[in-house]
Image (cartoon, helix red, strand yellow):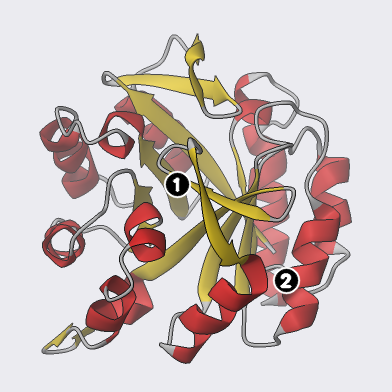
Amino acid sequence: MYIIPAIDVLDKQVVRLREGNYEDVTTYPITLEEQIDKYHANGTEIVHIIDLNGAKGDFSNQEYLFEIIRKTEMKVQYGGGVRSIEKVKELVDAGVYRVIVGTQAITNPTFLEELSKLNEGRVKYADHIVIAIDVLDEVIKYSGWLESSPIKLIEYIDKCLSLGFYRFLCTDISKDGKLGGAGVELYKKLLDHSPIIKLIGSGGISSMQDIEELNNLGKMESVVVGKAIYENRITIEEIKDWNLKALISF
């Protein structure tokens, strides 16, 4: 299981939200470029960047983000307001390694069907897609966690799998930003449902002990860690050591 450091960006600043609340923001005294360089210098190969402005339909950060993504050697897993096929293509063309889709995939019945058919030359766009599922008490939330979907969690997983999408970023909202531990039970349920799933956990990681607990599930592909790093509960050196072992075992 690989640890992927997370960077949330709001108004070009590195921040963290508590339970997705834009009114409850912690801003960190470091630039996005500095934070990426810090991870890269310590051997991290992939970073998770969320454009919180984009998630609300405001793409004022986009050129700033794209400029940094083009310059870095890091692989970038990127999300925030990806609600069209054109946006997916734009991000992949800009050098994004993985594109996270959430709201549009839930609210538009044909979006994933269209995306599953999209290939250009050697680029198979489905291989670049991460399906974001934000869950609160097994209810799928979207639009910045403000809306609830009537679609059952497992039904939605099965729909995505049937269209060839197998990598999921699952955030347990009840855990996010609280540093109280990860949603182990939720992840176990999803992993037990299908052996095909490549699952990325998110939310609640507070220590390397939480990392160990998720790793003990035996099937997690990776986990996104944000606030625990900024709060110095998990060091970059610990991430480096863990990921080196993960790559060797992989």
Q: Which residue is mark 2?
A: 190
Q: Amino acid at mark 2?
A: Leu
* Sequence order check, earlier mark of 2 and 1: 1
When the figure is inspected, residue 87 is found, relative to residue 174, above or below; the finding is below
Quadrant of image for the C terminus: bottom right
Q: Amino acid at mark 1?
A: His
- Residue at position x 65%, y 28% in the image: 177
Give left or right: position of 36 versus 145: left
The image quarter in which residue 237 lies: top right
Q: Where does the image place residue 131, in percent across and percent down from the top left?
A: 46, 65
The tag on residue 48 is: 1
Number of residues whose C-alpha sits closer than 10 Å to that of mark 2, classed few (under 14), some (14–19) or many (20 or more): some
When the figure is inspected, residue 2 is found, relative to residue 232, above or below; the finding is below
- Residue at position x 12%, y 59% in the image: 90
* Mark 2: secondary structure: helix
- Residue at position x 24%, y 55% in the image: 83
Q: Where does the image place residue 186, in percent across and percent down from the top left?
A: 78, 59
* Mark 1: secondary structure: strand
Quadrant of image for the N terminus: bottom right
In the depicted view, which residue is nearer to us: 102 or 209? 102
